[in-house]
Image (cartoon, rainbow, N blue to C red):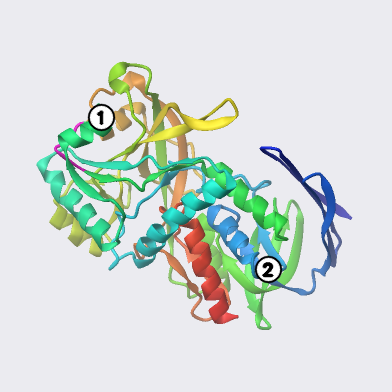
Amino acid sequence: MKIFLYYISQTLAALLLIHLRFIYRFRLDVALLVFQVDNLNFVFSKIRKVPMSERVPITIIGAGAVGCAIAYQLSKSYQEIFVIEKNSKVTAENQSSRNSGVVHAGIYYPKDLGKLKAELCVRGNPELYDFCREFEVAHAQTGKLVLAASEAELEYLQDSMRIARENQVPGAQLISEQQAKKLEPNIHCIKAGYFPTSGIVEATQLVHKLYSLASQAGVFFINGTEVVDAKPERGAFKITTRSGERKEIFESEIVINSAGLYSDMVARWVNPDSPFDILPIRGESAKFYKNRRTELYHAGLNIYPTPHAIYTDGTKAEVSFSEFQKLFKQKKVVKTVGVHLTPTFDLIDNEYQIGDIVTIGPAAQRVENREDYSENLLPPVNYLKAVKNIFPALETEDISLHQTGVQAKLLQQYDWVIQPDEKFPRFIQLIGIDSPGLTACLAIARYVEELIRSVA
């Protein structure tokens, strides 16, 4: 008999909630007992014996921000949802936390090339803020400045303004240098876009809250377990998992592929003709302390350059806007929002507040290993070169390295893939969920629920 102990402890104001889950796992069946203490009252919330030879209704592969959001959303209408996560804990270990934590407004995603990104980002932005307020997840609606530092960058900025209008981003404004400097006095630009609905969120706390709510609603998270194969069989899907040296096989009527960097591989297990490939792009970041010198003061906005293109090897494409459009449509370059400055949270007196650290990133590099977080990292001087034209007081000695992450960029297209598989419609694909996936996670979850209703 193999015993799994899940222990979650949280303190929220005057509420003590301890959620203990014991999973007794046998060769052919799993007995699931959830013993919950809620408001200090003992409640048996779930007693269920599930034979592993029997089909389960819904399996989600991956417990990042999107996977946990889907689990939380589906738990409102469905029972017996299983989430398989290869990491030992649900702690936003991969894409979900290895990023800037920016809440995007929706200004980068043209509808003709990125309909899902455009619609789900703009829809997900207020949903995320509402969720964070309701469940006390650290966040701040800081606003964003996108800075054109030269005449050549004005066309790129104008395109961002056009996309903002097309996507109906609230409050988007084109402002002068003087107006921009009233918001952030130490920047340099000739014009700027101001987008008040942008902000930041504490991603690890967000994912944990989604996980906690889904668990309390009866979703079963099987952590420390990797899905190693998935095949269509008898009108369902045979899922093979591995935990340590032990393998388990079970069937699921519906499978949701939210496997992040490995979503293309999972897709091909089920359908070898799946046409999608992940291009792993490592985003590296650095940091500086805004209180180090007066001229490094940062008022707390997200500060961005104008968007530009990078080649598939990660180098910047120094081209005119018209040439960028041509290369972009030919899939010869990838669009990036650029290396930017982002405020961060500090835990001060048991409360999350915007602190002294400002991150610089992400600086993009193509990597072969999808979990290469440490080889050949860029030096601080690279970050200085990237932002010196918009934040001129920064010097190399102010900068130290911060963190790295690898984004799952789709090679074949700009937009996300969120759809039933063409051959097996009960296999829901989420492939290439890069930025703004964190912002849109709740909207993506609702969209996936609609897809499930259409195929169930």
The residue that appears at 22% across and 31% down in the rendered structure is: 181
> Which residue extends farthest front?
14
Residue that mark 2 sits on? 239
> Magenta region's main secondary structure?
loop
Q: Residues within 10 Å of mark 2 (few under 14, many from 20)?
A: many
Task: Give, as a single range, the part of the protein colored magenta.
Answer: 188-192
Q: Secondary structure at mark 1?
A: loop
The residue that appears at 83% across and 70% down in the rendered structure is: 51
Amino acid on which disc 1 is placed: Phe
Residue that mark 1 sits on? 391
> Which residue extends farthest left?
151
Q: Nearer the viewer, residue 375 or 243?
A: 243
Amino acid on which disc 2 is placed: Ile
Vertical comparison of 164 with 348: above or below: below
Q: Position of residue 70 (x, y in %)?
A: 57, 62
Q: Quadrant of the C terminus?
A: bottom right
Q: Secondary structure at mark 2?
A: strand
Q: Position of residue 327 (x, y in %)?
A: 21, 59
